[in-house]
Amino acid sequence: MGSAATPMNAQPALSAIGQIAVTVTDVERAIAFYRDVLGMKFLFQFPNLGFFDCAGVRLMLSGSEKFTPSDNCALYFKVEDIQQSHATLAGRGVAFESAPRVIARMPDHDLWIAVFRDPDRNLLALMCERSR
């Protein structure tokens, strides 16, 4: 509910994302996958939590024994060369659900996506915006 100091129609002050949380069943296994297989920059861990740097946005892996995977969210990782990134990750054992493909043709670029999952079946994808 708004007040005189902050009217309901005022622009929200939210902008940059500082951290994204992903629930996993086994934090140690997830850390190994994100660090060793995906090659992400590992920052630190606490009991049942692991943290990575994603170009200034922190990714937090949070363990839960009651976790049930779903397609409620997905993480899309920007890459410069989707074919090369796909080949590298596939060589490390990542099982892709879809090979790199164009999913949208924009006026000045094509949007490429390749979909895969982490060990807990969380939806992940490579994303590449390739200029024409």
Image: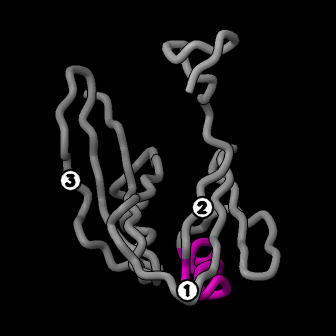
Name the residue: 65% across, 10% down. 4
Q: Which span of residues is magenta-colored?
A: 24-37
Q: Which residue is mark 1?
A: 25
Among numbered discs 3 and 2, the one appearing first in the sequence: 2
| Three-letter residue code for mark 3 | Arg
**Residue 33 painted magenta:** yes
Question: At which x and y percent is residue 43?
Answer: 78, 63
When asked about the image quadrant of residue 63, the answer is bottom right
Relative to residue 56, is residue 76 depicted above or below?
Answer: below
Q: CA distance from mark 3 to mark 2?
A: 27 Å
> What predominant SS class does the magenta segment belong to?
helix
Question: At which x and y percent is residue 17?
Answer: 61, 41
Viewport quadrant of the N terminus? top right
Q: CA distance from mark 2 to mark 1?
A: 13 Å
**Residue 47 painted magenta:** no
Q: Residues within 10 Å of mark 2 (few under 14, many from 20)?
A: few
* Kind of element beneath mark 3: strand
| Three-letter residue code for mark 2 | Ala
Q: Which residue is mark 2?
A: 21
What number is the disc on residue 127?
Answer: none
Q: Nearer the viewer, mark 3 or mark 2?
A: 2
Relative to residue 58, is residue 37 depicted above or below?
Answer: below
Name the residue: 46% across, 48% down. 79
When asked about the image quadrant of residue 26, the answer is bottom right
Among numbered discs 1 and 3, the one appearing first in the sequence: 1
Which residue is more in the foreground, 21 or 29? 21
Question: At which x and y percent is residue 73?
Answer: 40, 59
Viewport quadrant of the C terminus? top left
Q: Which residue is mark 3?
A: 101
Count every numbered label the image shows and give the total. 3
Name the residue: 62% across, 64% down. 40
